[in-house]
């Protein structure tokens, strides 16, 4: 996500820091690099120019040039302007949803065909149910696209959320999306649903959109929130479409889909400035749980290469909420005793999968995104390790020290790997087990500090081995080490008078 901008801004900052002294010429050169990075990321031309002018007017001030660390000042200015670009000048943040008090809240989704409206409808319903304790009703108001109603029904069955639909040809004469939405509101009031999500029809091109139909739904149903759903990977087309929909419907927010596959980020950085409509949510994966609130401050941190630690913490909390306090305490005690086996190791991978995968986690940690080699997928490596563990017996997973050469050959054959791969993995696991024992009683902050240190030193690079701890291992010097010490001592003795 945003690899181009992150790399471009990072290079510009490194160049400015690499100079012996910050001057106006250095700043001008650095901001040219930032501008190029923005334009290559498909940021709107006017938006990119205005952004650079605002940064330039602040960085060329005497206060920055005379400060003790001008490069840090410049980084802070760029960060603040990125936040302003995606957030606007509003002092108070907009609420995620405008929840009605005395009636069902109505959310209307609109957008072009193929933007991901129906899937987003399911994601929103899950979020409202699981995080806000609501009882949502999804409404199939797309009577144009073939199989749209069936798709929403299938989604409803998958996540356990009710769907309201009226199939064409089997209902009352004169069936229309407007009447479906009105009937759904009446149905929700009688069935104790407190959230209604309208999945409206779309077309492939903005010129073909039934804007009059959407305006009629907006006028007669009076939704509390109107969200425009758009594909982030379409770049400037997404910005132009958002502007057209906002002119017709007066949007409350934008939901960017497929943001995890958007290496440029032009839409995310341009929409607020061009349309004055805030980005509310972002789709970061195909899973129905892969919908996150769009927080400009966190996104700016990612773009500046500082990661998004708070997102990781929130994901950990949501995953661990499925565990009872007794289970969490039992895990802690096992770690404290050093009782960490391959069964526990595999459970950690399963929790990572729930949190969005290894690649997403690493990209959100400061300095960690650069540790993923280009073209390398950490999730593939994780699956390979899971295959090794699954090819072991129960006793081997519980006590991996019993795995000898013959067992390694059998495990390798079962997992499609080589015996030396099994040996290397077991050696790394032994080191991880030692570290897990050490961090059992650390606070979350101390654990994060430890991980950051490991990341900066390169220990978390794929294939790198963790340092062997000497704490509690009874490390003894080898004969070679003792001989070297004796030799050093003799030299020191000769120098003495």
Image (cartoon, rainbow, N blue to C red):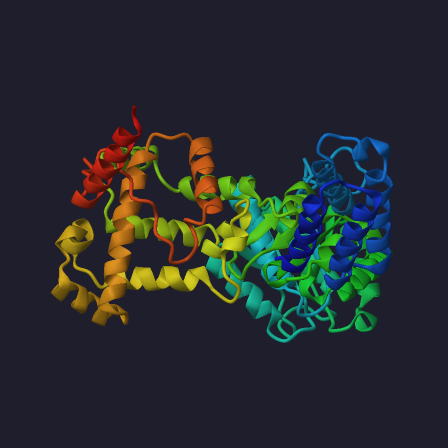
Question: Depth check: 44 or 52 in front?
Answer: 52
Q: Percent x, y for residue 308?
A: 57, 44
Can I make out residue 251 in this image? no
View extreme (front): residue: 497
How many numbered tags mark residues here?
Answer: 0
Q: In the rendered view, tell whether residue 494 sits above or below residue 402.
A: above
- Tell me the quadrant of the picture where the C terminus can be found: top left
Q: In the rendered view, tell whether residue 168 sits above or below residue 83.
A: below
- Tell me the quadrant of the picture where the N terminus can be found: bottom right
Q: Percent x, y for residue 428?
A: 29, 52
Q: What residue is drawn where x is 72% and y is 61%?
A: 41
View extreme (top): residue: 497
Q: What residue is drawn where x is 64% and y is 69%?
A: 171
Question: Depth check: 344 or 202 in front?
Answer: 344
Q: In the rendered view, tell whether residue 67 sits above or below residue 265.
A: above
Question: Depth check: 19 or 165 in front?
Answer: 19
Can I make out residue 257 in this image? yes
Classify residue 402 by image quadrant.
bottom left
In the image, 27: left or right of 355?
right
In the image, 106: left or right of 437?
right
Classify residue 295 by image quadrant.
top right
Q: What residue is drawn where x is 61% and y is 48%?
A: 305
Q: Percent x, y for residue 63?
A: 82, 31
Q: Percent x, y for residue 427?
A: 25, 53
Question: Depth check: 399 or 112 in front?
Answer: 399
């Amino acid at each position: 996500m945003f690899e181009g901008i992150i790399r471009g801004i990072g290079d510009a900052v490194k160049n400015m820091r690499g100079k012996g002294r910050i001057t106006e010429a250095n700043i001008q050169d650095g901001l040219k690099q930032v501008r190029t990075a923005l334009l290559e990321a498909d940021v709107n031309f006017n938006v990119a120019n205005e952004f650079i002018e605002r940064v330039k007017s602040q960085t060329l001030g005497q206060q920055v040039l005379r400060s003790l660390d001008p490069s840090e000042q410049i980084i802070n200015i760029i960060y603040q302007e990125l936040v302003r670009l995606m957030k606007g000048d509003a002092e108070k943040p907009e609420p995620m949803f405008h929840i009605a008090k005395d009636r069902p809240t109505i959310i209307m989704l609109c957008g072009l065909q193929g933007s991901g409206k129906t899937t987003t409808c399911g994601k929103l319903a899950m979020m409202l149910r699981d995080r806000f304790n609501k009882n949502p009703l999804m409404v199939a108001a797309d009577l144009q696209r073939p199989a749209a109603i069936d798709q929403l029904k299938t989604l409803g069955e998958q996540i356990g959320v009710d769907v309201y639909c009226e199939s064409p040809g089997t209902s009352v004469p004169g069936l229309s999306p407007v009447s479906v939405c009105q009937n759904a509101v009446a149905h929700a009031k009688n069935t104790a649903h407190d959230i209604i999500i309208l999945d409206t029809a779309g077309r492939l091109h903005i010129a073909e959109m039934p804007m009059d139909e959407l305006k009629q739904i907006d006028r007669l149903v009076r939704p509390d929130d109107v969200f425009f759903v758009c594909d982030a990977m379409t770049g400037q087309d997404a910005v132009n479409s958002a502007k057209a929909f906002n002119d017709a419907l007066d949007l409350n927010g934008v939901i960017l889909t497929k943001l995890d596959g958007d290496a440029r980020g032009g839409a995310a950085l341009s929409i607020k400035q061009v349309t004055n409509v805030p980005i509310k949510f972002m789709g970061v994966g195909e899973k129905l749980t892969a919908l996150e609130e769009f927080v400009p401050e966190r996104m700016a941190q990612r773009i500046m290469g500082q990661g998004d630690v708070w997102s990781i913490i929130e994901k950990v909390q949501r995953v661990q909420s499925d565990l009872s306090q007794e289970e969490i305490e039992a895990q802690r005690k096992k770690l404290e005793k050093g009782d960490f086996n391959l069964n526990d190791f595999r459970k950690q991978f399963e929790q990572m999968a729930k949190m969005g995968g290894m690649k997403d986690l690493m990209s959100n940690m400061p300095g960690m995104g650069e540790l993923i080699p280009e073209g390398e997928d950490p999730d593939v490596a994780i699956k390979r390790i899971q295959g090794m563990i699954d090819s072991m017996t129960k006793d081997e997973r519980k006590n991996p020290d019993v795995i000898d050469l013959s067992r390694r050959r059998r495990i390798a054959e079962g997992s499609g790997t080589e015996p030396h791969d099994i040996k290397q993995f077991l050696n790394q696991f032994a080191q991880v087990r030692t570290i897990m024992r050490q961090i059992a009683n650390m606070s979350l902050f101390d654990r994060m500090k430890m991980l950051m240190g490991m990341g900066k030193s390169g220990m978390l690079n794929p294939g790198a081995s963790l340092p062997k701890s000497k704490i509690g291992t009874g490390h003894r010097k080898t004969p070679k080490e003792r001989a070297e010490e004796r030799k050093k001592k003799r030299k020191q003795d000769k120098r003495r008078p």
